[in-house]
Image: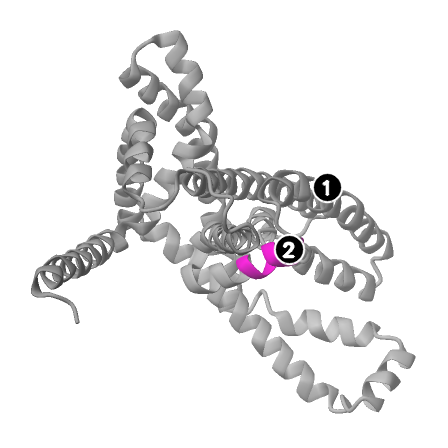
């Protein structure tokens, strides 16, 4: 039976742990509305930390080096994105008005595809139970019309609802400055507070930084290239709203393997079905060899190689992360997956070599 003298310190320890958990959860609750600003502030600080260090060596002044790094980020990242988003909002507004007025109707395109469908394919569809093609056509056309109007409305709403975005953007830049300047000292304080062995702190910290760099830098580079290449192809082919489709392809390219093909693939099929064989075959070849090459070559080099995660884990964690956290999930999902793997690797190493522990 434990003595009263031993129970008091144990009760104090448990009370302190409960207090620690409560204040940590309360702090996370307070920061939750600014989660996007905090996430991107941390991510950009990690990605641009090497740039800040180079500027610091030349300028010798932390504040000036931090401000110079932020100015560089604005020039290289923010201004091009602002221009693209402006073009996107304009094209989405025009597309929405055309769909609303009936001048842009997916039903017409579906009818053209059905009219060009070969007889042998029609027979095959009837054999598998899709004999009521008119009903299927109406459902498909209705779903496409609703989907296009929903997407256009969301984009227009994003362009109009700028206040929250500007607030988050200013908070992100403000936080980014201090993370660039004081990030190393802050990371040391966090490492010192963690109740883990020093070797485990180094391993988990390195994994955290590596995954952030790989997912942000790699995925954004791949998305920008695939979106730009796809938008260029649509512009050459004279397809309406090429910037809108380019941004959509860039967004979908965050999903490994499938990505941009969800946009250019159906367009190529439509061009083939409506008799535009040259444009359809050209888009298929271009999409497979050029747009697909970016995903097949650059993504493993920029994302999978650094994170050391299989492609299927990257795909599942990206999809799950975006389902839970929205657009921020393409960073949070792979990060959680990588930390999950790293922690279980530590557990496996402990069980395999229980006496081989380094401090």
Is the residue 63 above or below the residue 173 in the image?
above
Report the side of 123 relative to 61 (left or right): right
* Residue at the spot 81% in from the left edge and 84% down from the top edge: 125
* Residue at the spot 33% in from the left edge and 22% down from the top edge: 66
For label 1, the residue is 297
For label 2, the residue is 259
* Residue at the spot 29% in from the left edge and 37% down from the top edge: 192
Q: Secondary structure at mark 2?
A: loop
Region in magenta: 311-317
| Residue 35 position in % (x across, y down) | 31, 51
Near-viewer residue (199 or 278):
199
Is the residue 114 above or below the residue 58 in the image?
below
* Residue 177 appears in view: no
**Residue 58, image quadrant:** top left
Q: Earlier in the sequence, mark 2 or mark 1?
A: 2
Is the residue 208 above or below the residue 319 in the image?
above
Q: Quadrant of the C terminus?
A: top left
| Residue 287 position in % (x across, y down) | 75, 49
Colour setting:
one colour
Q: Secondary structure at mark 1?
A: helix
- Residue 41 among those drawn in magenta: no
């Amino acid at each position: 039976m434990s003595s009263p003298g031993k129970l008091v310190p144990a009760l104090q320890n448990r009370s302190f742990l409960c207090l620690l958990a409560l204040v940590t959860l309360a702090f996370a609750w307070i920061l939750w509305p600014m989660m996007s600003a905090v996430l991107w502030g941390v991510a950009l600080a990690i990605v641009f930390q090497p740039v800040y260090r180079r500027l610091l060596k030349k300028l010798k002044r932390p504040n000036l080096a931090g401000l110079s790094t932020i100015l560089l980020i604005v020039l290289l990242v923010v201004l091009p994105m602002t221009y693209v988003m402006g073009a996107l909002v304009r094209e989405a507004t025009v597309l929405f008005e055309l769909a609303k007025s009936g001048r842009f109707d997916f039903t017409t395109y579906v009818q053209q595809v059905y009219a060009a469908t070969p007889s042998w394919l029609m027979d095959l569809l009837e054999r598998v139970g899709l004999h009521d093609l008119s009903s299927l056509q109406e459902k498909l056309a209705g779903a496409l019309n609703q989907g296009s109007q929903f997407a256009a409305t969301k984009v227009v709403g994003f362009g109009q609802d700028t206040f929250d975005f500007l607030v988050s953007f200013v908070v992100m830049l403000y936080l980014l400055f201090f993370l660039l300047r004081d990030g190393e000292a802050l990371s040391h304080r966090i490492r010192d507070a963690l109740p883990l062995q020093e070797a485990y702190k180094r391993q988990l910290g390195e994994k955290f930084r590596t995954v952030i760099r790989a997912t942000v830098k790699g995925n954004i580079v791949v998305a920008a290239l695939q979106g730009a290449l796809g938008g260029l192809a649509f512009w050459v082919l004279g397809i309406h709203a090429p910037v809108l489709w380019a941004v959509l392809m860039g967004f979908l390219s965050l999903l490994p393997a499938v990505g941009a093909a969800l946009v250019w693939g159906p367009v190529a099929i439509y061009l083939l079905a409506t008799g535009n064989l040259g444009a359809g075959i050209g888009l298929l070849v271009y999409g497979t060899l050029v747009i697909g090459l970016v995903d097949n070559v650059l993504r493993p080099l920029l994302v999978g190689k650094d994170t050391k995660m299989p492609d299927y884990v990257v795909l599942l964690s990206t999809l799950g992360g975006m389902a839970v956290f929205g657009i921020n999930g393409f960073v949070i999902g792979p990060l959680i997956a990588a930390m999950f793997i790293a922690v279980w690797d530590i557990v496996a190493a402990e069980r395999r070599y229980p006496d081989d522990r380094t401090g």
